[in-house]
Amino acid sequence: MSHRLSGPERRESILSAAQGLFASKGFHGVSVDEIARAAHVSPAIIYRHFDSKQALYDAVLDKFSGQRQSYVDTIVNHGTRFEDALAGMTQVYISNIAANPDILRIELHSLLEGNPATHAFFQNRWKSFTDYIEFGLNEYLPYDLPDREKIILSAGLMFQGMVREALIQKCLQPHDRLVDLSLYELSHELVTLFLRSIGINKTQLSRKATISG
Amino acid sequence: MSDFDSELDASGLNCPLPILRAKKAIAAMDAGQTLKIIATDPGSVKDFEAFCKQTGNNLKSSGEEDGKFIFFIEKAA
């Protein structure tokens, strides 16, 4: 039925089938045969496009790395103030996940599977935030603050945990308790709470920075 | 390569920090002056191209040396 696809279309259709399966079962839970069945092709066709299951998995992850340009936009178009850029980056990140929750599912599977390459891929995505927070706080916090280094490291982790949990609650396990709060409102409130916790009280986070949705 | 007026070492930093720091550094410079940036994130190549396209600053050169990415950006008038 779908044997008339061009090479690139075929590759895309295999990637899309693989993405869904990796998202629901993780890397180890899926065989190439299973992906072939889902994509309505033979395993030989899959190997014509991808050297191995790992190569196919890497290609799925590759599709997810398209958010860089958006961070550049955020930095160019929002002020250089710590809180504005952080809010803008967070919006970009959650919009990406909300549009494609498979990436969050794949991330959670990969945490349990312990594949070093995949771990590095996802850590690198969060590193944009933790680097940014560590760098910003390093400039912002008074030098004589007790436990300064520990606070800076913990703040990055706090932010990552907060945003990841919000995404899990809103994208993977919709919860009645949070039904009146959209993901964007939730993220806005969490960023504000985060900023308050590190002493940035008078945030002038404009609603403009909040993507409507 | 060419001369530069300021230098920014963004080694080890992930997007968007190198961009943010470059933006701040360029803001403090005069038109026509050149900023040299060193970065290690491979994504920074695309990032700085996009950054210069959007800000109108001139990306005079972009190259790789020993695993480091070196950019020279001239501030627009």
Image (cartoon, rainbow, N blue to C red):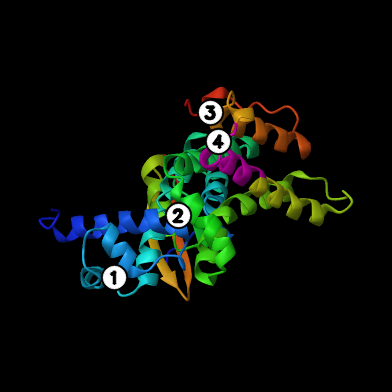
Discs 3 and 4 share one subunit:
yes
Of the residues under marks 3 and 4, which one precedes in the sequence? 4
- Give the CA distance from mark 3 to mark 2: 30 Å
In magenta segment, residue A171: yes
Q: Tag 2: Cα neighbours inside 10 Å, few (<14), some, or many (≥20)?
A: some
Report which residue position mark 1 lands on.
A50
Q: Amino acid at mark 2?
A: Ser
Residue A60 seen from this side: yes
The label nearer to you, 1 versus 2, is 2
Discs 1 and 2 share one subunit:
yes
Dot 1: element: loop
Q: Tag 4: Cα neighbours inside 10 Å, few (<14), some, or many (≥20)?
A: few
Q: Which mark is residue A210?
A: 3
Camera-nearest residue between A168 and A126: A168
Of the residues under marks 1 and 3, which one precedes in the sequence? 1
In magenta segment, residue A94: no
Q: Amino acid at mark 4?
A: Pro
Discs 4 and 2 share one subunit:
yes
- Give the CA distance from mark 1 to mark 2: 21 Å
Report which residue position mark 4 lands on.
A174
Dot 3: element: loop
